Image (spheres, rainbow, N blue to C red):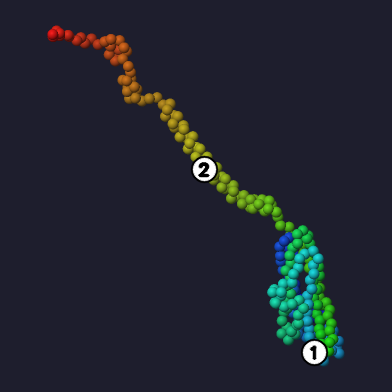
Amino acid sequence: MSWGRYAFSYEPEVSSGKSTQLELQFQPHAILSENVIDRSLSDQVVRWHAKAEYQPQSIGSKYDFQQSGGKPITRNLDLHTNNEETWAWTIQGSRDFKGDTSDLIFYLGYDTDLGDKAETDVWREKVKWIEKNDPGFAKKAWTWFTANLTLFLGVLVGITSIWASVKTVQVRKLEIEKNALGRPLPAVVKDLVGSEQEPSGEPGCNVDGSKDETKVKLGPVKD
């Protein structure tokens, strides 16, 4: 038997040390069935209330008052407005908790002016959490590197090309200098070099080795 519309939401994977949310929504029917209470109480003023209970065993859980509309876990229901009610819990993943399966239980109850009261669970559901395996630093670094491998290869190829170009220019420059030093001297340079040679050293010889036939006349020596 349904006393209203139920809905709950959560992400089943939670990382160790991280937090997430579990929420339960309930929208009551405007007129609840008489099967909930005795017919003899129908003439009495009946106040309805609802309560949600969640107590996991292997994972941290804290009731979130703000996310629950600023209302307590046990609250009165206004059947005239038929408003939707929300219960929320902050779930904290414990270290190496692996997983947790616990019941989320919803209760409906009433009390009357004559002191009659009752409460019963009308809905329950298994909430299953599993630990999300986040990769370690080394794995994250490797994943990032492989994802950017194409970029790295492009940069490496560019650097290699620049280095090869620089080395080619240097080698070419050295070859030009070597060829320039090993090239025969031009004729003009040879003539200049030859004109600077020392005389043969023989008396009366010209620079080219021929004898100078010019005779010098000596005049009388004056007293």
The image shows residue 144 at horizontal and vertical percentages of 64, 53
Say which of marks 1 and 2 sits in front: 1
- Examine the rendering and report whether any part of residue 158 can be seen: yes
Dot 2: element: helix
Q: Quadrant of the C terminus?
A: top left
Per the model, the C-alpha gap separating discs 1 and 2 is 90 Å
The image shows residue 10 at horizontal and vertical percentages of 73, 68
Amino acid type of the residue tagged 1 in the rendering: Val
Dot 1: element: loop
| Label disc, if present, on residue 108 of the rendered structure | none
The image shows residue 126 at horizontal and vertical percentages of 80, 69
The residue sitting at 78% across, 86% down in the picture is 47
Instruction: Please state if 168 lies on the left or on the right of 16 as rendered.
Output: left
Q: How many marks?
A: 2
Query: Which residue does the numbered mark 1 point to in the structure image?
Result: 45
The residue sitting at 84% across, 82% down in the picture is 118
Q: Residue furthest left?
A: 223
Query: Which residue does the numbered mark 2 point to in the structure image?
Result: 162
- Examine the rendering and report whether any part of residue 4 can be seen: no
The image shows residue 35 at horizontal and vertical percentages of 85, 84
The residue sitting at 57% across, 45% down in the picture is 156
The residue sitting at 71% across, 81% down in the picture is 83
Q: Residues within 10 Å of mark 2 (few under 14, many from 20)?
A: few
Q: Quadrant of the N terminus?
A: bottom right
